Structures are given as structure tokens and as C-alpha cells.
Image (spheres, rainbow, N blue to C red):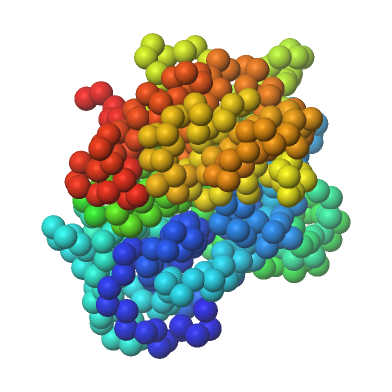
């Protein structure tokens, strides 16, 4: 696709969605839309993909999203799973370690990766779709949000042209032209501290994992990346200029304590950068939306900039698809900002806080910090809290495209991501659960039949939506055919993880969104009323029509909004 479209893109005039920016967020969103048959145009001012590493860490949620778009097997060869993060002091003595082993979402929580190669797989994935197009050398010059669509003015090597669309999504980075044209603020701070980042081929150390040196003389980071790449990052002092930091002799001086031969390095690139903690004043304005760095920027310390953008794509993608294909009212898109803003803000705050802990250059302050961290590490509960990454904010939606019971049960999982264990079906052994659930909504019951607990009316409404119906059983009951239904998939709880999850809950019926968020949950007898409430939140009236008049097959959600 990339080679065919450089310099002579077809004159597309009308699509459903224009995505501005062919980075990882834009490409992931395009793949989600492609799978839902949404006509999509991706435009980028560059000639091709960026060919040097930027992000270096993938989490389990991002890999789960890549699984959902059918590309995880292409991505995995460019990753190094189960990477350990170690914080050390000025003498390289261990202060703290993060080494999570939990795979509740089906994938390791920490993975190093080579971003250019992963981005290339996301781009190649679009070749599957005749209705998705990527145009390089096509900067967006202007965008006009009208009552019934968006008019996008593009410039480039083929001259100016106009594209009309139902929606535009700006995935065009921290300096987003889309955000500027929207007139949306970018609130927050930029750190005055500069850092030199250096990527090396033929890793001069070769050992795995990440080491963050909280050295007051010069805080620094060493990161092992897949395919023999090593990243170093060094704080630049106020009396050191950007020009000086770019010189080979300066780099050799920085690396001398860390590698045997600092003058024998294969440098991929080096650059000086600063850390930003910023969030857009709105992720949506009319028919124009923002995602990824265009919507929020955060320091690198938790490796969540890339992953937060992929979360944006996963949250927004199914909602856009539902709206532009007539299965949802436009109001569904308001829940994107409602749901993603608080979590993005929490990630920015966490990353900023970790940076402040790592970066003190005052030796007394650093010594006090080291003493405090070492003291905390002797407390087993606190040590395990850090080791297993339980400090990481997880998405939990109190408002948006969700239905919470009233009063709210103390252990309710509504608004959180459901687990992804391996399960058995009668045709497959050890399948990841998401691969059984499909790409749209699903209704999952433990120890019950979905048609029976939902009732014929609600079952028919979810079937019209294209939902997948699942009944989960202990594996020993998998082959029992007494309640078989051609519309229901029976899964066996291979490792007992599904039962253990339900052991901790009072609910036994789950309504799962395409992004695997639990949209609603209840005990079996409340399934019909809970189903009706969720379909109402998503936009479907009891008579099978949306509030805008769409039939049941195209209905989705009227939205529960946060209080004013």
C-alpha cells in the first residue's frame, strides 16, 4: 500500500472517516474501522513511516488491541516480553524492581518493542481492506465542520483537493494541526529539563531489561529493545547546550562509565527532547476528534504515551463504527471524552510523579529518596504493590457507555476490562477468550444459557446487533449437549480463571463491549431488565427503534452522562 500511494494517490472525494496522521494510533484506528467496513482515508504529511524508534514499551492492553485487529502474531516477533524495570542509585545498587508476571488480559504486562517495525505491520494490515486508503504527502490544510459532515482540504504533491467525511480524527501528534484548527487548548506544563536520547544498533551491552539510574550527578536510563537495539537517555544540565549534546565526543563521555568502548558504537539516531505533561481541553468538538499525542502528552517514565494512544483507538474505534454505520446515535461519541480523559489524566500524573522521583540532582534530596525507597521495600505488601505494577491506573468508567446498578454493589466490575484467559470450545483447545468473543458486543453467562436468562425479546435484540452469545462452564461439562443452541458458543473454563473471576463477584451475566469493557453485569434473574437498560443507554427503544428512528439491527446506545 505504502509504495503504491506515494505521490499519486487516487482522488478520493467522499469517505466515512478521515484520519489525520499515519502513526501507530491512526493506523490502529484505521484497522478497527476497516474490520467494521467503514470507508476510511488516512492522510499524512510525511512521505512514509518514521523509521527510527520512539516508543519502546508495549503493555498487555496494547497487545490485546493488536490481537483484536488480527495483527498480534505479526507484531510479536518485534517484541521482548516480560521485561524487568530496575531502579538503581548512583552506585548502581538496586532501589526497586518492577517485574509483573500476571497475564490476566492474555499478554505480558511489560514488553519492549521496535516501533518502526510494529508500525509497519499496522500499515500492512490495512492492505486487507479495499475500503481503507492511506495517502502520503497529503497534509491537511483546513477542515470545516458543517451540519451534515466535514470538509477536509488537503495539499500535497498532486495539488490541493477536497475530501468530505462524516468525521475527522486527528492522530497527528503533539503539534497537532487538527487540534489547532479545532481551536482547542492544550493545557499543562513542559519541563525545562532536557534529555539526550540515543539509539544504538548492535547493543553494546546485550543484557535484557531496563535500568533507570537515579544518579544525582546525571540521571540516566538504559533500555534493551528487540533486534539488538539499545536506548540510552541522559539528563542534560542547564550549562550544556543542545549543540554540545549532539557531538560524538559528548556522547562518548556520557557512555564511558556504561560501555567498554564508547567510541565503537553504531548510532541509529540521537536527539535532545523535553518532557510534556499536557491534555487537550476537549477530545471532541462537533465532528472532529483527537486521539493519541494530539489529545495528551506525558513523560516517558512509565512508557505509557504510546499505550495511551492505543487505548484511545480501542475506545473510539468501535464507537465511530457504530455511529457511521447507523447502529448508534452521534451522542455515543461524547462518551469517548468522558471515558478516556480521566484515565489519560491519571497516566500523565503518574508519569510526571515518577519523573520527579527519579530526577533530583541535589545529593541530599537524592539520598533521602533512596533511604525512603529502601525502607518501603522491606514492607512485603508495598514491595509486592510495586513489583506487580498495581500502582498503574486501570480504566474504570463510572460514566459513559456503561450501566451501573443502583445501589452500586461494592465489588462491581462494570466499567472495567474483563479478563482474557485461555478457554476450550468444542472445536478449539486453549483459545484466547477474545478470539471466541468476536469483534463486536458479546453476552457471557456463567452456568446459564443466554437465551433463557435474557428471554426471547432481549436475546433477539442483541442478536440483531450482531452480538456473540457465550455460556461458560467447567471444562468437565464442555461436551454436554443438553442446552445446545446454534446461536450460543459453549466454552470450557480450561484453567479455572473464569470461575475464579466470578468467585469474586455477585454478578453472573456480563455484557461486554467490543473493547472488552464490561458495559453491564447482573445476576441471572435481572438479565432482561439489565439488557433493556443497556440497550436504552446505547440508544435502542423497546419497540426496536432508536430515538432517531433506526431499526433494531442498527440500534445502539443512549448515553449515561456524568453529573454536571
Q: Is there any visible trace of residue 136 in the rendered image?
A: yes
Q: Is residue 512 above or below residue 7?
A: above
Front residue of 496 and 66: 496
For residue 341, side relative to residue 514 (left or right):
left
> At 45% across and 29% down in the image, what residue appears?
454
Q: Is there any visible trace of residue 342 in the rendered image?
A: no
Q: Is residue 505 above or below residue 115?
A: above
Question: How far across and down, in percent of the image, does residue 263 sit?
Answer: 78, 65
> At 56% across and 57% down in the image, what residue appears?
69
Question: How far across and down, in percent of the image, does residue 43 sit?
Answer: 38, 71
- The image quadrant where one finds the C terminus is top left
Question: How far across and down, in percent of the image, does residue 201 sit?
Answer: 75, 66
Q: Is residue 16 above or below residue 403?
A: below
> At 30% across and 30% down in the image, what residue appears?
560
Question: How far across and down, in percent of the image, does residue 341 sit?
Answer: 38, 37
Front residue of 533 and 156: 533
For residue 110, side relative to residue 271 (left or right):
right
Q: Residue furthest left?
A: 147
Amino acid at each position: 500500500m505504502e509504495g503504491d500511494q506515494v505521490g499519486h494517490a487516487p482522488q478520493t472525494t467522499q469517505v466515512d472517516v478521515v484520519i489525520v496522521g499515519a502513526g501507530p494510533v491512526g493506523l490502529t484506528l484505521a484497522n478497527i474501522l476497516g474490520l467494521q467496513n467503514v470507508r476510511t482515508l488516512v492522510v499524512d504529511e510525511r512521505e512514509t513511516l518514521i523509521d527510527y524508534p520512539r516508543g519502546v514499551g508495549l503493555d498487555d492492553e496494547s497487545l490485546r488491541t493488536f490481537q483484536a485487529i488480527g495483527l498480534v502474531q505479526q507484531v510479536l516477533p518485534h517484541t521482548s516480553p516480560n521485561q524487568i524495570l530496575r531502579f538503581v542509585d548512583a552506585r548502581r545498587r538496586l532501589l526497586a524492581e518492577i517485574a509483573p508476571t500476571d497475564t490476566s488480559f492474555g499478554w505480558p504486562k511489560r514488553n519492549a518493542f521496535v516501533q518502526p517495525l510494529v508500525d509497519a505491520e499496522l500499515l500492512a494490515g490495512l492492505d486487507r481492506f479495499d475500503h481503507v486508503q492511506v495517502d502520503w504527502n497529503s497534509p491537511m490544510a483546513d477542515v470545516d465542520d458543517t451540519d451534515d459532515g466535514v470538509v477536509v482540504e488537503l495539499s500535497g504533491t498532486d495539488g490541493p483537493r477536497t475530501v468530505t467525511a462524516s468525521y475527522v480524527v486527528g492522530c497527528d501528534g503533539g503539534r497537532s494541526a487538527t487540534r489547532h484548527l479545532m481551536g482547542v487548548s492544550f493545557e499543562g506544563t513542559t519541563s525545562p529539563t532536557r534529555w539526550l536520547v540515543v539509539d544504538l544498533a548492535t547493543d553494546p551491552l546485550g543484557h535484557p531489561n531496563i535500568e533507570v539510574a537515579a544518579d544525582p550527578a546525571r540521571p540516566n536510563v538504559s533500555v534493551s529493545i528487540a533486534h539488538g537495539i539499545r536506548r540510552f537517555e541522559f539528563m542534560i544540565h542547564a550549562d550544556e547546550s543542545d549543540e554540545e549534546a549532539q557531538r560524538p565526543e559528548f556522547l562518548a563521555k556520557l557512555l564511558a562509565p556504561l560501555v567498554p568502548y564508547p567510541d565503537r558504537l553504531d548510532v541509529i539516531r540521537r536527539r535532545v527532547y523535553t518532557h510534556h505533561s499536557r491534555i487537550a481541553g476537549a477530545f471532541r468538538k462537533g465532528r472532529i476528534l483527537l486521539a493519541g499525542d494530539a489529545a495528551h502528552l506525558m513523560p516517558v517514565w512509565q512508557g505509557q504515551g504510546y499505550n495511551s494512544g492505543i487505548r484511545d483507538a480501542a475506545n473510539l474505534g468501535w464507537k465511530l463504527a457504530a455511529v457511521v454505520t447507523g447502529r448508534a446515535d452521534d451522542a455515543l461519541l461524547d462518551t469517548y471524552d468522558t471515558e478516556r480523559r480521566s484515565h489519560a489524566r491519571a497516566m500523565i500524573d503518574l508519569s510526571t510523579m515518577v519523573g520527579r522521583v527519579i530526577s533530583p540532582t541535589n545529593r541530599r534530596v537524592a539520598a533521602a529518596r533512596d533511604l525512603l525507597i529502601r525502607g518501603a521495600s522491606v514492607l512485603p505488601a508495598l514491595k509486592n504493590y510495586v513489583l506487580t505494577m498495581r500502582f498503574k491506573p486501570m480504566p474504570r468508567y463510572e460514566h459513559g457507555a456503561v450501566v451501573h446498578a443502583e445501589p452500586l454493589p461494592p465489588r462491581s466490575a462494570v466499567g472495567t476490562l474483563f479478563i482474557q484467559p485461555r478457554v476450550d470450545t468444542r472445536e478449539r483447545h486453549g483459545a484466547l477468550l477474545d478470539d471466541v468473543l468476536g469483534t463486536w458486543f458479546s453476552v457471557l453467562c456463567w452456568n446459564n444459557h443466554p437465551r433463557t436468562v435474557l428471554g426471547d425479546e432481549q436475546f433477539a435484540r442483541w442478536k440483531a446487533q450482531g452480538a456473540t452469545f457465550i455460556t461458560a462452564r467447567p471444562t468437565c461439562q464442555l461436551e454436554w449437549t443438553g442446552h445446545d443452541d446454534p446461536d450460543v458458543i459453549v466454552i470450557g473454563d480450561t484453567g479455572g480463571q473464569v470461575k475464579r473471576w466470578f468467585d469474586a463477584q455477585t454478578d453472573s451475566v456480563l455484557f461486554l463491549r467490543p473493547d472488552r469493557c464490561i458495559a453491564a453485569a447482573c445476576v441471572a434473574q435481572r438479565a432482561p431488565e439489565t439488557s433493556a437498560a443497556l440497550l436504552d443507554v446505547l440508544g435502542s427503544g423497546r419497540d426496536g427503534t432508536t430515538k432517531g428512528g433506526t431499526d433494531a439491527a442498527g440500534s445502539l446506545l443512549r448515553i449515561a452522562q456524568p453529573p454536571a
